[in-house]
Amino acid sequence: MNLYKRSFLKLLDFSPEEIRYLVDLSAELKDKKKRGIPHDELRGKNVALIFEKTSTRTRCSFEVAASDLGMGSTYLDPSGSQIGKKESIKDTARVLGRMYDGIEYRGYGQKIVEQLAQYSGVPVWNGLTNEFHPTQMIADMLTIREKKGDFSGLRLVYMGDARYNMGNSLMVVCAKLGMHYVACTHKDYFPEAELVETCRKIAAETGGSVELCDDVAAGCKDADVIYTDVWVSMGEPDSVWEERIKKLSPYQVNAAAFSYAKPDAIFMHCLPAFHDLDTTIGKEIHEKFGLTEMEVTDEIFEGPMSVVFDEAENRMHSIKAVMYATLKEGA
Ligand code: CP
Ligand code: NVA
């Protein structure tokens, strides 16, 4: 397996073997970290972390992982650089490529991260775009494997906006790894037909499947994993809340949804999550629409089926694996 110098932009670019390798490597690096075995094998290298959208997990994961690997890192916040405003992505890529060994990008269109990779000459890692969130997928697959032993044959049900980064990425990774993916949501939030077609072709080769379903009982039946994400993503206007609440409320992950799933089904969420009124946005939505919980109830989020904090921790181990595999010759 050789991922040296490869960019990590979306999982469609990677074979099932390469994805499994990254999950294995994440587990190996997690074990080293837990046992206090140093793994600072990338000493002397530096990475740039561009965030055009905010972050807690992804930013902290890249910074801690870079430090554990012996690398320096520079964080460019959503307002603290010339990117896009005074300098094109093509020019930025050529500047950063002269100073850094790798570049993380979180922001808007997938085209931006593709362009960074094309012009920088160094590995570029997608830390979330509107279309995909691939580093989250390696963490999620590590989490699923830790809880379930393997991924093949499992039924993963995604409830919510299945046309966006999380739904798209989960559909791709499930197809690649022979899992059964179900987008259980309002028809308006079904994924784009072309990507569904692509994933179905992949699934036909791996033994997986892709299903679109707007009935909660049928969709969640025998689920091994029920997954959700915020109803309104970063960068979307506040004006979409009303429609999302109306159309996605029936697809809230709650005890009723779990009653159809397998008894040992787990709950996953990339986080951040609106499961109580302890956030500013949660309070605003409560005042405006009367909701106390949104995509997931507090009961499920805090329940024994919830693995969300293991999942969050695994972001760091898997981001470390992605950087290590693409920056270390002979990794
Ligand atoms: N899941 C995730 O990407 O979290 P952040 O937005 O905090 O990075
Ligand atoms: N769909 C969410 C994912 C956050 C990790 C967003 O893009 O805001």
Image (cartoon, rainbow, N blue to C red):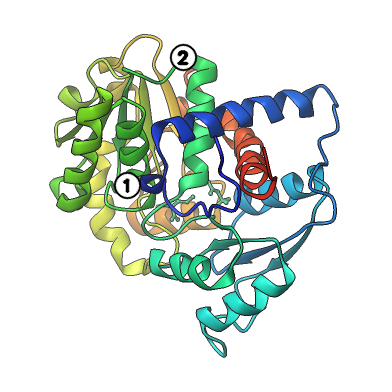
Q: Badge 1 is on which residue?
A: 168
Image point (26%, 15%), residue name: 222
- For residue 79, above or below residue 299: below
Question: Is label 1 in contact with label 2 (beta carbons under 8 Å)?
Answer: no
Per the image, the residue denoted by label 2 is 148
Residue 47 in percent (x, y) is at 71, 60
User: For residue 51, what is the image quadrant?
Assistant: bottom right
Residue depicted at 59% across the width and 53% down the height: 5
Q: Secondary structure at mark 2?
A: helix
The x, y position of residue 206, in whole percent, is: 28, 26
Mark 2 residue type: Lys
Residue at image coords 29%, 64%: 240
Residue at figure coordinates x 77%, y 26% from the top left: 32
Question: 80 or 251, which is in the foreground?
Answer: 80
Instruction: Tell me the quadrant of the picture where the C terminus can be found.
Output: top right
**Height in image: 253 above or below 231?**
above
Counting every numbered tag in the picture gives: 2
Question: Picture quarter containing residue 248?
Answer: top left
List x then y, in percent, for residue 65.
Answer: 73, 44
